[in-house]
Structures are given as structure tokens and as C-alpha cells.
Image: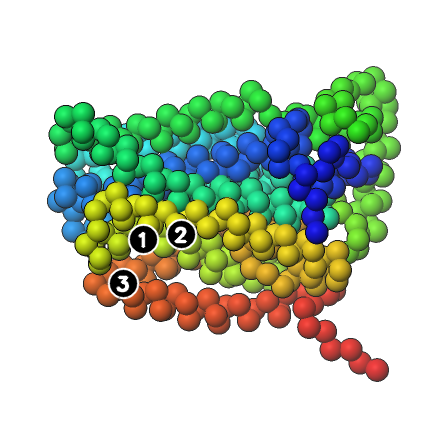
Amino acid sequence: MVKLLANPLPIDPVTQKADAINIFSVQRPYMRAFHLSWFSFLTAFTGWFAIAPIMPAIKKDLNLTVSQVGDSNLTSIASTIIFRVIIGPLCDRFGPKRVMAILLAAGAIPVGLSGLANNASEFITLRFFIGIIGATFVPCQFWTTQMFSSSVVGSANALVGGWGNMGAGVTYVIMPFVLEGILSSGVSDHNAWRIALVVPAGLCLVVGLMCLLLSDDCPQGDWSRRGLSIEQSTDVEAHEVFHDVSEKKNANKVEKKENDAASNYSDTNAPAQKSTRPAIGMFFFALKNPNVIILMFMYACSFGIELAVDNVIGYFFYEHFNLSLKMAGLIGSLFGLMNLFSRATGGFLSDYFYKRSGIRGRLLACCGSVFGIVPFVDPTIVGAISGLVGAGGNIGGLIFTGVFKAYAHDTPVAFLVLGGVTMCVSLMTFLIKIDGRMLLEIRRK
């Protein structure tokens, strides 16, 4: 199985990526980036879903209809689709830490301004712009893809994605308590939920600043230094020391060495990564690959369903079972908090079976393993593919949120529909073909 407590971290001599993980380390560059990637995504969730746990209070204050609540849920996910597609190439161009910081700062603005809404139109519009922050998933996954080799990238991506997704559960715990604390201090119902939204907005700004000041884009440090050679050492900190003069002379040699490794790519080689400038043609090129379409469908029925359920689960418990806002939030939080282990399990299994069966092994799991497959689809445009697959998750979230809106007065039926669709889409796994390999192969004599 994947080493989660490796000390020191083994480093691949060609790609300069880590071949193991140490979850209790915060050393630069590898584990610092690992922890900031998931913590940034978790923080983004506190802003993205800050409204959901306290929606009953907002609905009452703004006199929202059930349909308007559904519309606001739809817009908060719809806008993320656009931004996730754009963000992939920006990661390729500018590196993950800058993109992550900018998204957190940009998303914090509409989160904080949501408290100024006085009617349904203003509220729905602000929720649309809050969706910007949902695009943080792309730099989250892109970041660990730059830091960890193919042998552990499935686990790394699953861990940071899963722990980041816990933000929905954390938000369901925190926001009702924050609201109750503000109400207990004597603030009116009209103002309490508005003040409460300042908390997640402030958290997003702080964590965004941490990304800029305390982390690295890649093993070599800043994104501008990617591809340069570094002196191998068991001390991870030593990888921050660069010899500029000698590396400028050797840069071309290193690039040739990495290109040779890419051309010899197989199930046992790490996927080479090549940065490209943002271009619309890149997306069309990626979409010509049927594997990208299939992974988008699969992610729509895993992460997409999670997004849809995160938006309604607290309100469902509040209305359907007549629970208090705080109790509904606590129970609803369990769904998101399962990501502590559920998504990571998919990544662990993906890496485990990859070592035993090659790329076919990665085709056996779902949400946690989708991004264990992404780096192998086309290593030259990982950012663009990450953005498209991530957008697939949001498209699924949009569709399934629409299902919940359609069955707003019979939510259990909506859950039944989601389950049936997911079972059907799971069969698409048998159509994926990576590096000439499929999950089931018919061998001719």
C-alpha cells in the first residue's frame, strides 16, 4: 500500500516528484503543498456552502419561495462550471498557488457581500458569483499532481480532494453555531445571518494569503523554475537550494531527459507534464479524447451528486423531520465529513491496484480514483483535462440539483433518481482505454 508516513520522502530522480507521502509533515515543498491544497479547498467549501446550513433563516428573512431557494442552489453550482474550465489552463500557465490564492480572494468578496441582499434577485445573483470559489478544486488537484509521482498520485489527489470536500461537513457544523452565537448576543434575526457570512469570507482571505507566502508550486519552488534540475538529497528542505549558473547550462539537457522519459511512458513510468498557455483549442483537443468525456460523466455522478446533496441535506432534515437548525446541521454534516476516509479510499485502491495491475488497476474505483486516472489521459495537458473533468462534476451537480428542485415536495424520490442514474453511469468504466489498456480485455489466440 501507499506509504503515508515516509520519512524522508523518496524522490524520483527524473521527475523530481515525491514517491511517498508523510501526512504528519509540513516540510517544503512537497508536504507543505499537500496540506495547503486540501486546506485551501476545505476553506473554499466553507464559503461556497456557507449559506446552505442556514438557508431556513435566510428563506424566512427574505421571504423566499421553495422555487427561489432551488434557483439559488442551481446558480451557485452553474457558475463554477465556467470557472473550472477556465482555471485548468491558468494553472498550466501560472502555477497552482497563485491561482488558488486569487480564487479564494475573489470568492470571498461575494460571500461577504451576500449579507447585503434584500430580495431574491440580489441573493440569487450573489450566489452565482460565490460559485467562483468552487473552481479551487482544479488547483487543488493540479498542485498535488505536480508534487507526487505516478505511484502515489492517486492517493495524494484523493486525500486532498476528500479532505477538502470535508469542508461541506465542517460548514454544516460551524455555521449554525455561528448563527446561534450571534443571535444569543442580542442581534436581530434580520442581521444575524448577514453577520455570520463574514466569518467564511474572512477565512478565505487568510488562507489565500497563506498560499502565496508559505508554499511552492512545484518541487523546484516557484512555477517559473519548473523543469530545472535540483541536487538529490534525503533532506526535502535541501531541494530549495538552486545553483542558478549550472542549471541554466543544464536546462536543455534536463528538458531532453524528461521528454525522453515521456516518450517511453508506460504503466510503470511517471506521466510527463508539459506546461501550455491557455488556449480554447486545448479544450477541443481534450474533448476529442473519449476518455475525457467518460471521466466527466463519472465525476458528474460522484462529486456532482455530492454537490447537489450538500445543498439540500440540511434543509431536508430541517423540513422533513422537523429538526432544529442546529441539529439538522449536525446530522447533515455527517455526509460531508465522510470524506475523511471515503474519497481517500478510492485513491488508495487506485494506487494499490496500479502497482499490481498497471493502469487497469486504476479503473476499478470511482470518485477518489477519477483523478488518479486524469494524469495518464494526456500528460501534456493535465491542467485542461483536470478543468474539464472537474467541470463535469459541476455539470452533474447542476443537473442533480435540478432534480431536487423538480421533486422539491417529494425529496426521497429525488434521491432514488440519483441512485439509479449513478448505477447506469458506473458501467461506462468498461469503455475507458488508457495507453491501450482497458478494464476488460478480450485476448485473441
Tag 2 residue: 335
* Residue 15 left/right relative to 110: right
Q: Dot 3, crowdedness within 10 Å: few (<14), some or many (≥20)?
A: some
Front of the two marks 2 and 3 = 2
Q: In the rendered structure, which amino acid carries the disc numbered 2?
A: Phe
On the rendered structure, is 179 left or right of 440? left
Label 1 SS: helix
Q: Residue 128 lies in what quarter of the image? A: top left
The first of marks 1 and 3 along the sequence is: 1
Position above or below: 152 against 10:
below
Q: Nearer the viewer, residue 72 or 283?
A: 72
- Quadrant of the rendered structure where residue 13 is? top right
Q: Contact, CB < 8 Å: mark 2 with mark 1? A: yes
State the residue at coordinates (36%, 69%).
Answer: 417
Residue at which label 1 appears:
313
Disc 1 to disc 3, C-alpha distance: 10 Å
Disc 3 residue type (three-letter): Thr
Q: Which mark is residue 442?
A: none
Q: Are marks 2 and 3 in contact (CB under 8 Å)?
A: no
Residue position marked by numbered label 3 in the rendering: 411
Q: Is residue 253 visible?
A: yes
Q: Residues within 10 Å of mark 1 (few under 14, many from 20)?
A: many
- Looking at the image, tell me whether mark 2 or mark 1 is earlier in sequence order: 1
For badge 1, the amino acid type reads Ile
Number of on-image labels:
3
